[in-house]
Image (cartoon, helix red, strand yellow):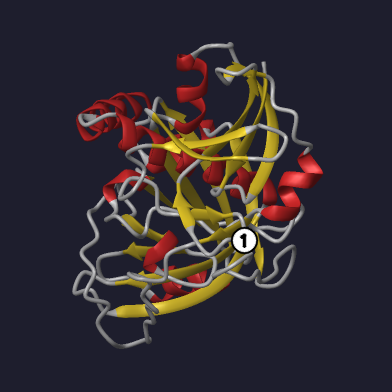
Amino acid sequence: MRVLVIDPYRNDVYEKDIPNSLEGVQSVVHGCIQYVTQFPNRDILYVNDEAEGRFDPRFGLGTGDTLPGFGVVVGALGPENDQGPALSSLDELRSRVQFFIPIVGLADIKFEVGKPTNLAVTRNGADGGSVILLGGHIEPQGVMIVYKLSKPTLAETETFKAGLVEAGVSRDGIATVLSWRFTRPSDGKQMWFETPFHMGLQEAGTRYLVPRETLRHGRLLTLVLQDENAVCRAIRTGTLAPEVSHAMEEAVIEQVIDAATDPAFQATYDVALQRYFARTPDPKSGFDTAPVKGPVLPAGQMGGAVAWVVT
């Protein structure tokens, strides 16, 4: 059965074929459905009855009200509004829908070389550890990686500041791990880090990523190096390759849905990470086996700003 999906994470409206059943419609909004309105052509818009507080991005139809999470437009047949294929066109619905993200909870996080970051970073592997800040935690497009090295040498700091950076994305169930390789051009010396994450572990109001300008653009990225005392030693910016950006974005959406639908998601995530680390015992092996890889390009290359309050 043809339905139209309103997806505020991808800022898109698209067709989907689902089973003609209550469960089929519920699978689109990821929970129990709630009636919103009936269109002049008798199509009906439903949303998730418990989306508030679980899904942060919202959408509206130009009436002033906004709705959290996913929406689904389903056809209505006969005097009893029996469920059927949607009649609305994609272009018609796209022209009406606006997407919004919350601005409450957004923080403009800025670090300075020589000053504390006040961030705790767990060590992962021989080279050090890293932590990810994304979505509503930072602005405008939302990816920052903070790396930690204990007593970084001048050579390590220079490799971080000027070396070639590559990123890999690995998945194990709902767990996602970003792997990073820094290569010094002068002699090929390399450093590796890994950054596991689950978007559901962030607080409500920050669980989203602003879509990129186009699929050809990469996602803007800030890289920060701190020492064992959490003092910032170096900062650089770049742009994630489009294929890496896309893999990250799809992982975030799946993780948001996972957190909204599974009360035990954190335990499941921890088990998935244990499997991943058992299979890839160090960041180098994690990068080497990552199925999606791409370079971190200079800032502005394959990058671009987007409107991030209303799009």
Residue 39 falls in which quadrant of the image? Answer: top right
Q: Is residue 245 left or right of residue 46?
A: right
Mark 1 Cα-neighbour bin, 10 Å: few <14, some 14–19, many ≥20:
few
x%, y% of residue 124? 28, 47
Quadrant (top left/top right/bottom left/bottom right) for the C terminus: bottom right
Front-lying residue, 259 or 225: 259
Residue 277 falls in which quadrant of the image? Answer: top left
Q: Secondary structure at mark 1?
A: loop
- Which residue is rendered at x = 54% and y = 54% of the image? 59
Q: Give the number of marks.
A: 1
**Rendered position, 217 above or below 225:** above
x%, y% of residue 215? 73, 50
Quadrant (top left/top right/bottom left/bottom right) for the N terminus: top right
**Rendered position, 229 above or below 311:** below
| Residue 6 visible (yes or no) | yes
**Rendered position, 255 above or below 240:** above
Q: Is residue 159 left or right of residue 270?
A: right
- Which residue is rendered at x = 75% and y = 29% of the image? 87
Outermost residue, front direction? Answer: 79
Residue bearing the label numbered 1: 62
Front-lying residue, 32 or 142: 32
- Which residue is rendered at x = 34% and y = 59% of the image? 205
Q: Is residue 260 left or right of residue 23?
A: left
| Residue 191 visible (yes or no) | no
Residue 145 falls in which quadrant of the image? Answer: bottom left
* Three-letter residue code for mark 1: Gly
x%, y% of residue 63? 57, 61
x%, y% of residue 289? 52, 31
- Which residue is rendered at x = 23% and y = 35% of the image? 266
